[in-house]
Image (cartoon, rainbow, N blue to C red):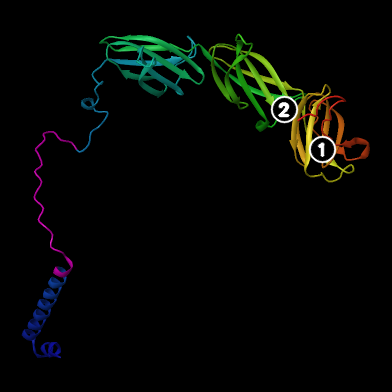
Amino acid sequence: MGVFQSISTGGKSLKCALLLVTMGFASISGAFAQALAPELPEVPALDIPNIPNLKGYANPKAPENNPFANEPELVLSAKLSDKGQAIPRGLVWRVFSPEPSGDGKLALLATAKGGTTSFNLAPGSYLVHVAFGRAGATKRITMTRAKRTETMILDAGGVKLNATLSGGGRIPPDQLRFSIYEDHADQSGERALIIPDVKPDSVVRLNTGTYQIVSNYGTANAVIRSDIRVEAGKITEANVEHRAALLTMKLVREAGGEALADTAWSVLTTSGDIVRESVGAFASIVLAEGEYVIIAKNKDRIYQRDYKVVAGRNQDVEVIASEAASSPATTNQPAEGEEPLD
């Protein structure tokens, strides 16, 4: 009521009322702030030394922060052949100490990726290695106080691999893989594997030379081996031909019937060698052209069928679960006078 009365009686009373209200709020807010804010000890001011030329960050590329910035520069590039162009990308450069360390290995001093690159190296000898895919070259380089430019010749090319079925049929890429081996065998008659699991239509960089290519269609016996020559600065395309077919086998009670579950499958050559074994209602397998014996075991019965694989002819193969094609599943029995087998 007092505030309303002051407003109604005149300007002076209004000013006094507002002043009292303001002072009241000020005292209340001050007391509230003192209640919330605990008394903290005074923190002494830090004594920051005066460091001349102090910057907010250290730039690693700045000459003053690079201990090798004042060393002579070695500029490196690489070519596939003498007459080729400098390779613009995909190179991996490594600089090694020429002398082995205590563990017998060469110390790696610097690396770089891309095309043409440069290193700042102190005067002395170094081993420089450049890799382009599986192709590579190494060279000893001696640095003086002068800048040096060096071009390394890889003497390398590329190979692009693919395969088709007999008659030009297409092979699904996910069922086709290549392996690349050295062209000569070691003392045990084995060839050293260089690159496994190469996908079709991918370019592999290799040093000039002859290599053995192994093509696998599926995971059974459809395998083709061939030799290929890689030439410097060129990509050699190799397309091999598989004489094979994809079979999908099922055991049925009658032609066109439903496949019987829990069937164990074995595929044998006519000489009795096992090509592949699997378990399931359906069994898919890629087989090289030829004659085979297909055996299906279900419960206590064994069924078999002779089958001839024709190159490029993918087929569903039914084994009929009939008495004529079956025999009881028995374990190996010892001959008369012999001990039972374990």
Tell me where residue 13 appears, x and y as whole percent.
Answer: 7, 86
Foreground of the two, 259 or 80: 259
| Residue at 89% in and 36% down | 327
Circle 1 Cα neighbour tier, 10 Å, few/some/many (<14 / 14–19 / ≥20): many
Tell me where residue 69 appears, x and y as whole percent.
Answer: 25, 21
In whole angstroms, how far apart are the C-alphas of marks 2 and 1?
20 Å
Predominant SS along the magenta part: loop
Task: Name the residue beneath numbered marker 2.
Answer: 220
Which quadrant is home to the N terminus?
bottom left
Task: Name the residue beneath numbered marker 1.
Answer: 297
Task: Give the mark count.
Answer: 2
Which quadrant is home to the C terminus?
top right
Q: Specify the amino acid type for callout 2.
A: Ala
* Residue numbers of the magenta segment: 34-55
Compared to residue 311, the image places residue 149 above or below, namely: above
- Could you tell me which secondary element the residue under label 2 belongs to? loop
For residue 20, which quarter of the picture?
bottom left
User: Viewed as shown, does residue 150 lie left or right of 133?
Assistant: left
| Residue at 15% in and 89% down | 4
User: Viewed as shown, does residue 115 lie left or right of 135?
Assistant: left
- Residue at the extreme left: 12
Tell me where residue 251 appears, x and y as whole percent.
Answer: 83, 40
Circle 2 Cα neighbour tier, 10 Å, few/some/many (<14 / 14–19 / ≥20): some
Magenta-colored stretch includes residue 180: no
Q: Specify the amino acid type for callout 1.
A: Lys
